[in-house]
Image (tube, helix red, strand yellow):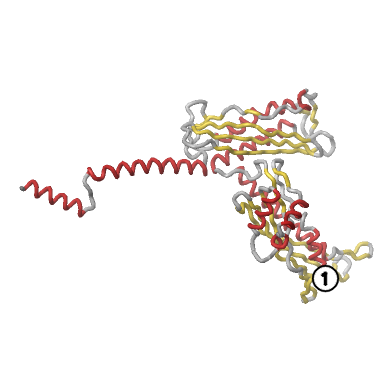
Amino acid sequence: MVLKSSQRRMSIQRRANGCQPVSRTLPYLCLMLLASGFAEKTSFAQSVTHSPLAYVRRLRIAPISIALALPRELEAPAKPRTSKRVGLGGTEEPAKASLHAAARDVLRNAIVARVQLLSGLNVVESDEDAVLECEIDHLTLRSGFERRVWIRVRSSLRMSSGRVEPITLFASGESSTTKGLLRKAYQGTDEELLSRAAAQAARQLVHSLVSGDEHPFARSAAALIVPAGMPDSVSISRSGKVEDLPSGLTMLARHADVLLQPEVGAAVSLVDPDAASQAAAKLNLSEELVSRAALGPPIDALCLLASSVGADYIFWSRIGEAGLTETSIIVAKVNKPGLERHAEVQASAALIRASDRKVIWRDSATGTATARTEYVRGRVKIRSEEQCLVDAARSTYAAFRFSLEDYKRKFER
């Protein structure tokens, strides 16, 4: 009787404390263990999607393969040329065929050197956690005013455990050199150009492996540059009086399709502007693309236009405000009256990825231009009001070009 009463008290105490008998809690423990196993596998796959090297401590880099057939003009090795560079001694430039053959070793050395900078990751030859397989699918050498080497790499990261699918990433690099002022030879050798291009591709690749972010212009794609949107009016201030300047707005509109000139690289082709204009007119998007109703880019209209012309990226820009101020001055050199014209243009630009309708780069800038009266041989010279506005717009869009280059450089850090 005493034993039964003590067991009854222990059972009541367990219930009060929220405990259950082991026989009842065992099935729940099994379910929790199974659920934790599935949750761990899902989180692992998600982390690999965002950071491919998150669970890799030993990485094996396979020998680089090349998916290009040797071009006909490179089948017979060219005669080595002597590059007499200014300030440097004569060096022997490798032939194009030798450059084509040396690309594998140069690229692999660049990738290994970059990977070894990562803490907690070792490059091994066996017993690896993952294998990095790289293939050169583009290698271009162009000559003209400048000599340029461009290389693109397609890589695949395969986990030894096989728990996730192989991850495919692209990276590219390019380097160029110009001719000397006094001699016709180029200032850099092909070997140096290839080394710099491979180093840039290696930086992009390792950045993608660490962060999961791929360079937007590494894959073959098409980009659409939409003509710049114009403001409702352009104002000019003379002696404290503000009035519209229709000729200034007309001059800016004439340059709408050439203001934004981004550098997209060799893998990206630009959509024909005429084809884009025809598609926009057919879809009745012309007014919506230049409308100022929305502060940002019209994502729906831009993606619809990109789908109709087969574009993967869309460059959009709009001039928000443009104005000109004209004041009277005294030209100091001749002590005569003159004018000073100061133009200011504010604009915004964005880069949209059509696949997920995401704005991946965006910036706003203000450009200025100033013109003053000059007396040259007794004649008065000064830039026109319209030309000042165009110069200010060019200054604004030059800032966009530098900003976009900074955005692309973040994929090499």
For residue 89, side relative to residue 112 (left or right): right
Eyeballing the image, is 211 above or below 317?
A: above
Q: Is residue 294 visible?
A: yes
Q: Position of residue 18 (x, y in %)?
A: 23, 52
For residue 53, side relative to residue 362 (left or right): left
User: Helix, strand or loop at disc 1?
Assistant: strand
Q: Position of residue 29 (x, y in %)?
A: 30, 43
For residue 46, side relative to residue 4 (left or right): right
- The image quarter containing residue 227 is bottom right
- The image quarter containing residue 143 is top right
Q: Is residue 92 visible?
A: no
Q: Position of residue 278 (x, y in %)?
A: 76, 54
Residue type pointed to by label 1: Ile
For residue 13, side relative to residue 222 (left or right): left
Eyeballing the image, is 175 above or below 356?
A: above
Q: Position of residue 288 (x, y in %)?
A: 69, 62
Q: 264 or 82: nearer the eye?
A: 264
Name the residue furthest left.
1
The residue pinned by badge 1 equals 329
Picture residue at 33% right of the left edge, 44% below the top:
32
Eyeballing the image, is 253 above or below 195?
A: below
Q: 38 or 315: nearer the eye?
A: 38
Eyeballing the image, is 64 above or below 268?
A: above
Q: Residues within 10 Å of mark 1 (few under 14, many from 20)?
A: some
Picture residue at 82% right of the left edge, 62% below the top:
387
Picture residue at 59% right of the left edge, 38% below the top:
169
Q: 312 or 157: nearer the eye?
A: 312
